[in-house]
Image: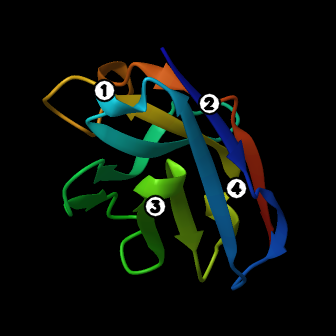
Amino acid sequence: QVQLVESGGGLVQAGGSLRLSCAASGRTFSIYVMGWFRQAPGKEREFVAAINWRGSSTYYADSVKGRFTISRDNAKNTVYLQMNSLKPEDTAVYYCAAKIRVGATLTPAEYDYWGQGTQVTVSS
């Protein structure tokens, strides 16, 4: 089992920045990829960014490229999502997820463990 706890959400004005953190515990040695997803009211959960747990590969949704940066600190078993130039359309609950299987990284169904989510609200 892997447990994930997100933090760092909040209310920010458009153009501002936030950094989300996701602390992993338990069988972290089994993690293959860590990802961030978000879900706005009335919408499906969508991919935001992902990072290989041991490599250097990162993946981003087109909507956040150039604004968001995913990174990790393996010593702390923590993944971060630095969000800059935030827009009102970035408002959503942001979820951290861990994937232990090799394969696609963009689909929520491919991930095995999820955090409880943290609210990000961007005001215009």
Q: Secondary structure at mark 3?
A: strand
* Residue at the image point whose x is 36% and y is 72% from the top: 65
Sequence-first disc among 1 and 3: 1
Sequence-first disc among 3 and 2: 3
Give x and y (percent) for residue 33.
30, 40
Callout 2 touching callout 4 (CB < 8 Å): no
Compared with 81, 22 (above or below) is above
Q: CA distance from mark 3 to mark 4?
A: 26 Å
* Residue at the image point whose x is 47% and y is 34% from the top: 97
Residue at image mark 1: 30
Compared with 115, 81 (above or below) is below
Q: Secondary structure at mark 1?
A: helix
Sequence-first disc among 3 and 4: 3
Residue 57, by quadrant, is: bottom left
* Residue at the image point whose x is 62% and y is 30% from the top: 115
Crowd band around label 1 with a 10 angstrom C-alpha radius: few (<14), some (14–19), many (20+): some
Query: Residue 73 shows which numbered tag?
Result: 3
Q: Residue furthest front?
A: 75
Sequence-first disc among 1 and 4: 1
Residue at image mark 4: 91
Front residue of 86 and 77: 77
Crowd band around label 4 with a 10 angstrom C-alpha radius: few (<14), some (14–19), many (20+): many
- Left or right: where does residue 46 sit relative to residue 80? left
Colour mode of the rendering: rainbow
Give x and y (percent) for residue 48.
43, 52
Q: Is any atom of residue 103 visible in this view?
A: yes
Q: Amino acid at mark 4?
A: Thr
The nearer-to-camera label among 1 and 2 is 1
- Left or right: where does residue 70 sit relative to residue 119? left
Residue at image mark 2: 115
Q: Residue furthest top?
A: 1
Callout 3 touching callout 4 (CB < 8 Å): no
